[in-house]
């Protein structure tokens, strides 16, 4: 297996494409690896970050008539965008989805979805075997149990898939705070979805905008 290291192995927004898989009510109902609202928060943050960095994002569901529509918190980020509804459990065997990814011309494939052990692991392992540079965002994904999620991660790592969290991905895409092109949008995502980091950021802004006692107003 080729080791993932060196500067070229880091993710770049201009070479990334994001696929969000099956963030649907049926899957969320049996999500036991994470607190469900955290996965909802993190997957929404991931979608917003991709939009902020102009990363093409493919939305796909599986048999939505039975499993429910993709969470509106995600679809609202991409108003009017077509959602690819599949019958294939393995997204990478679904030609419309794969064609949409290939049409972007990008090779850094980023995946998040429900459940990790099924609808994330299968496409990640297949795409990695076909030469794609695959990253799974673990905290925007989740499984039916802690064991299922963790075993799926181990299985994907063994297949050469990279693992990250959404905040790590945003940091890697940003890379340098001197890059201001997307900075306002990125900071807004962190403020809305970053938990303690969002509170720290807003506190920092308060301190920076608080006049020093005794100074001229």
Image: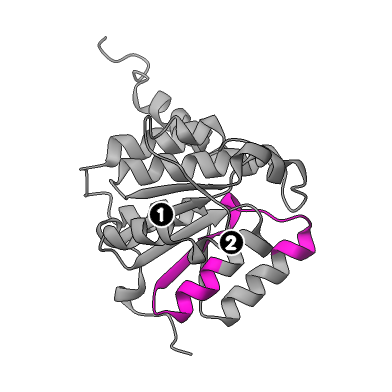
Image location (x, y in percent) of residue 60: 49, 48
* Residue annotated with mark 1: 18
Give the class, few, some or many, for how many residues have Cα within 10 Å of label 1's Cα (few <14, many ≥20): many
Q: In terms of depth relative to the viewer, which is nearer, 140 or 101? A: 101
* Residue annotated with mark 2: 120
The CA distance from mark 1 to mark 2 is 12 Å
Q: In terms of depth relative to the viewer, which is nearer, 217 or 184? A: 184
Indicate yes or no whether the magenta region holds residue 90.
Answer: no
Q: Which residues are magenta?
A: 123-149
Q: Residue at x 41, y 54 (%)?
A: 18
Q: Quadrant of the C terminus?
A: top left
Q: Residue at x 38, y 48 (%)?
A: 57
Residue 27 position (above or below residue 129): above
Where disc 2 sits, the SS reads helix
Residue 57 position (above or below residue 78): below
Q: Residue at x 58, y 58 (%)?
A: 138
């Amino acid at each position: 297996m080729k080791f993932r290291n060196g500067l070229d192995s880091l993710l770049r927004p201009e070479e990334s494409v994001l696929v969000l898989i099956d963030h649907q009510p049926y899957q969320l109902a049996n999500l036991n690896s994470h607190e469900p609202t955290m996965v909802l928060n993190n997957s929404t943050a991931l979608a917003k970050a991709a939009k902020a960095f102009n990363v093409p994002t493919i939305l796909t569901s599986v048999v939505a008539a039975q499993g429910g529509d993709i969470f509106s918190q995600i679809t609202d980020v991409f108003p009017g965008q077509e959602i690819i509804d599949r019958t294939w459990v393995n997204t990478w065997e679904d030609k419309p989805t794969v064609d949409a990814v290939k049409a972007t011309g990008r090779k850094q494939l980023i995946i998040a979805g429900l459940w990790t052990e099924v609808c994330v692991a299968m496409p990640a392992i297949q795409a990695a075997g076909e030469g794609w540079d695959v990253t799974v965002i673990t905290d925007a994904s989740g499984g039916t149990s802690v064991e299922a999620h963790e075993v799926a991660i181990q299985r994907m790592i063994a297949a050469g898939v990279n693992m990250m969290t959404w905040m790590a991905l945003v940091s890697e895409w940003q890379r340098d705070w001197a890059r201001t092109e997307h900075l306002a949008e990125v900071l807004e995502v962190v403020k809305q979805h970053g938990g303690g980091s969002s509170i720290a950021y807003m506190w920092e802004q308060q301190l920076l905008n608080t006049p020093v006692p005794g100074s001229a107003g």
